[in-house]
Image (spheres, rainbow, N blue to C red):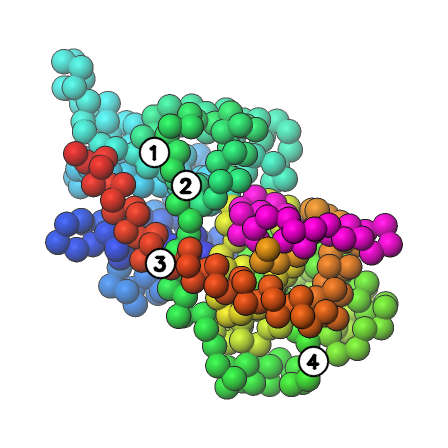
Amino acid sequence: MNVGGTSRLMVWLTEALNNSEFESTLICGRVPSGEEDMSEFARQRGIEPLALREMSREIAWTDLIALWKLYRFFRQYQPDIVETHTAKAGAVGRAAALLYRWMTPRIMFGRPRHCRVVHFYHGHVFHSYYGKMKTATFILIEKMLARATDRIIVPSQQQLEEITDRFGVGRREQFRVVPYGLDLDEFVGTLEDRRGLRSRLAIAADETVVGIVGRLAPIKNHDMFLRVARNVQELQVPGVRFVIFGVGGGRPILEERAHAMDLHNVVFAGFTEDAREIYSALDVVALTSRNEGMPLTLIEGMANGKAVVSTSVGGVVDLLGRVERREMSGTAQYEVRERGLGVAADDDAAFTAALLRLLTDDDLRRSLEIRGRAHVLQVHEKEQLTETIRRLYRELCT
């Protein structure tokens, strides 16, 4: 239950699956050191997560204890459906569900326990996270687990094609594309929210703020965000601030690098609980990740009517829409998409050029803001997500 979009989605799904028709329990692992816990977010919605201290993000021998505890819980709870999220918890949860299905005397008569297994991919770890051997091991494990999974949920068509076609995990008929749904009203701020946060961060009302929101982890590539800030500073573009919202173990290293670069235009804002303040304070939402599923921070920013510039990775491609044209700035090339500007991963020059285009072309920026907000209001409402999952689970249980 570390801070992030996945935790919020799990809470919303658990909430939607607790009524006269469904009963649902949320099980989570231990929050890593240096990250904030979102368990209180669940409690505010009447959900008390069951935390397994033996389960953490990294692989450890205690995973065996977590596996056994999950199996014992399934024996007691007798679930019709086991729903898993994220790479590590998804592996342990599906392995425990497999034990629950088959460790029964009824197997002597070819009758395993009736339990469906559904796994959600919020992105994947099949590239840019680990070395070749570790990545190959994870892909092999996911291929094996996919055989014991009834349905696999992905947030975008791009993710489906990557996971099945590029990495060979699962069969097409197992997959369902279900776009993320959010309580979009939670992210729409006011002028008062904008002034309040900017005042606390010592940012003037007339400054343009480019923000990145997310966990401070290597896969998010905040180093690239710092390099782009340096490029803008060296070009002496006036009145632009770069703000980093998020927590994680990588913050001290990033702060050291910002200091070494002598960056005067970067602010580390840490964790801000009220998302409305964050997005109302921003003018442009940036994302520099090397690998993504469907980044909620971009959806949240677009719901607030903010222009987006992002690396074109994973589900970002579907979120920003088709390429309308490709433009050059010197030797740098970036994409003008339907709902935002896209660049190749780790291409600092292209990201800088795309950002400067947003900062100087008011007509383009306004057009992207309008189209982005209209899209997320049409496609990414929370009720669309929860009702789709409810329908799927009814089908699985018939």
- Front tag of 2 and 1: 2
Q: Is residue 359 left or right of residue 103?
A: right
**Mark 3 crowdedness (10 Å alpha carbons): few <14, some 14-19, many ≥20:** some
| Residue 119 is at least partly visible in this image | yes
Q: Earlier in the sequence, mark 4 or mark 3?
A: 4
Residue at image x 32%, y 61%?
A: 42
**Identity of the amino acid at label 2?**
Val
Q: Is residue 121 above or below residue 299?
A: above
Q: CA distance from mark 2 to mark 1?
A: 11 Å
In the rendered structure, which segment of residues is drawn in magenta? Answer: 310-337
Q: Looking at the rendering, which quadrant does residue 107 occupy? A: top left
The answer to if 333 sits in the magenta stretch is: yes
Crowd class of label 1 (few under 14; some 14 to 19; many from 20; radius 10 Å): many
Depth check: 193 or 395 in front? 395
Q: Amino acid at mark 1?
A: Arg
Residue 204 magenta-highlighted: no
Residue named by callout 3:
382
Secondary-structure class at tag 4 = loop
Q: Which residue is mark 2?
A: 177
* Residue 251 percent across, percent down from the top left: 63, 61
First in residue order: circle 2 vs circle 4? 2
The quadrant in which the N terminus is found is bottom left
Residue under label 1: 151
Badge 3 marks a residue whose secondary structure is helix
